[in-house]
Image (cartoon, helix red, strand yellow):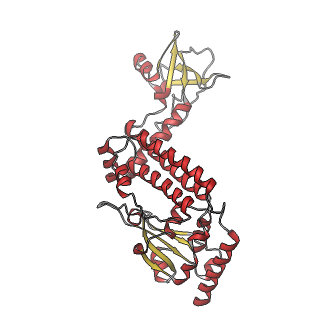
């Protein structure tokens, strides 16, 4: 099932421009995001081919099957509630049956957790980018030798330095694991290269050291410690860092570089926006996603605020959320039974008109 299929088969129930253009935060460089809702043909819905979501390759066009959309509305998912709250001037298409979905049937005190949780996730992303900017990683990947230390004559030295000093080849080394000593090995060296030692590691992509069969009475050259935990952390961070480099939005990255605050300002803008939206829901029982503080939010996006200042701002909003939740007239949860009957009614109308 593709987006083309949805439109060609007249399965769309709703389609709208979302994201910055719907929020009133678009700039000249803003992309156009599309979100929509569709329903499956009866045979697919009742059969084994249920498809909950369809998207294009870049995920800037995403469509949700009706049941999945309603399920996420019940959970007060911020992205999905915002789709339902799309301003009229951003709606591209709406099937009459879609009018059965009313915002009042979904807004609840759950938004404190969902919007707040999503906002905190944005903070974590901003922190993650700060770490990547401040601590760039060399493109050349380190190998296990970089995480090995040699102990010799009551002194310690990096394995690579030790090998260079001794004019030893790692391929001629043999290791034997020391019992009851995590990461510790006895290191032997085969000068002639005829003892079939397996070397310290098999290849540069190895995650573990190689063990060799060591003949009796062989001389121990030194003792080696391999910090495998540190190596595992490094491999994970290296993979994440270069994945981020290869996939990052260059315009967004350039903005973060220009303001020089070492955090993802767009993530922090959305953090504040989400918390303000949740506060609006709890205090008014409504959700209007077209922001009234465009200049403030764009100022955050441009990096005009210090990172710690924004964290304190977010904390203040979270405190207000907690207070607003206690005083809100909204229900704790949406009425699942009522929503279920609405969904059944919608599907009955759709399948009655198409079959």
Asked if residue 199 lies left or right of residue 167, the reply is right
Asked if residue 63 lies left or right of residue 178, the reply is left
Viewer-closest of 126 and 200: 126
Viewer-closest of 80 and 300: 300
Asked if residue 186 lies left or right of residue 56, the reply is right
- Residue at 53% x, 57% y is 278
* Residue 203, above or below 57: above
- Residue at 58% x, 81% y is 41
Residue that protrudes farthest toward the right in the picture: 337
- Residue at 59% x, 70% y is 104
Quadrant of residue 298 in the image?
bottom left
Quadrant assignment for the C terminus? bottom right
Res 355 seen here: no
- Locate residue 128, reporting x and y percent: 46, 43
Viewer-closest of 199 and 74: 74
The count of marks equals 0
- Locate residue 176, reporting x and y percent: 60, 23
- Locate residue 143, reporting x and y percent: 46, 33
* Residue 202, above or below 248: above
* Residue 174, above or below 35: above
Residue that protrudes farthest toward the top in the picture: 153
- Locate residue 51, reporting x and y percent: 58, 71
């Amino acid at each position: 099932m593709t987006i083309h299929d949805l439109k060609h088969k007249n399965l769309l129930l709703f389609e709208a421009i979302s994201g910055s253009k719907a929020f009133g935060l678009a700039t000249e460089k803003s992309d156009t995001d599309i979100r929509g809702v569709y329903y499956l043909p009866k045979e697919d819905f009742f059969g084994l081919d249920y498809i909950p979501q369809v998207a294009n390759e870049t995920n800037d066009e995403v469509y949700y099957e009706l049941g999945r959309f309603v399920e996420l509305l019940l959970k007060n998912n911020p992205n999905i509630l915002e789709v339902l709250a799309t301003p009229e001037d951003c709606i591209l298409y709406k099937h009459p049956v879609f009018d059965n979905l009313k915002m009042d049937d979904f807004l609840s005190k759950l938004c404190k957790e969902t919007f707040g949780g999503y906002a905190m996730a944005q903070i974590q992303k901003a922190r993650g980018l700060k770490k990547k900017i401040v601590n760039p990683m060399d493109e050349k990947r380190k190998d296990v030798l970089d995480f090995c230390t040699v102990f010799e004559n009551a002194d310690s030295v990096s394995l690579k330095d030790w090998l260079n000093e001794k004019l030893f080849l790692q391929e001629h080394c043999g290791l034997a694991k020391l019992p009851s000593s995590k990461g510790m090995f006895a290191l032997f060296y085969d000068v002639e290269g005829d003892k079939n030692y397996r070397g310290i590691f098999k290849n540069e992509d190895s995650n573990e050291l190689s063990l060799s069969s060591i003949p009796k009475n062989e001389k121990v050259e030194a003792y080696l410690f391999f910090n495998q935990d540190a190596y595992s952390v490094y491999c994970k961070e290296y993979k994440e860092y270069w994945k981020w480099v290869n996939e990052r939005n260059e315009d967004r990255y350039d903005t973060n570089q220009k303001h020089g605050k070492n955090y993802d300002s767009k993530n922090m803008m959305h953090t504040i926006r989400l918390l303000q939206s949740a506060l609006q829901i709890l205090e008014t029982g409504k959700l209007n996603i077209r922001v009234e503080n465009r200049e403030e939010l764009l100022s955050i996006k441009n990096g005009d605020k210090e990172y710690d200042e924004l964290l304190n701002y977010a904390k203040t909003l979270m405190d207000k959320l907690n207070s607003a939740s206690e005083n809100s007239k909204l229900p704790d949860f949406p009425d699942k039974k009522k929503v279920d009957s609405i969904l059944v009614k919608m599907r009955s109308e759709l399948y009655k008109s198409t079959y």
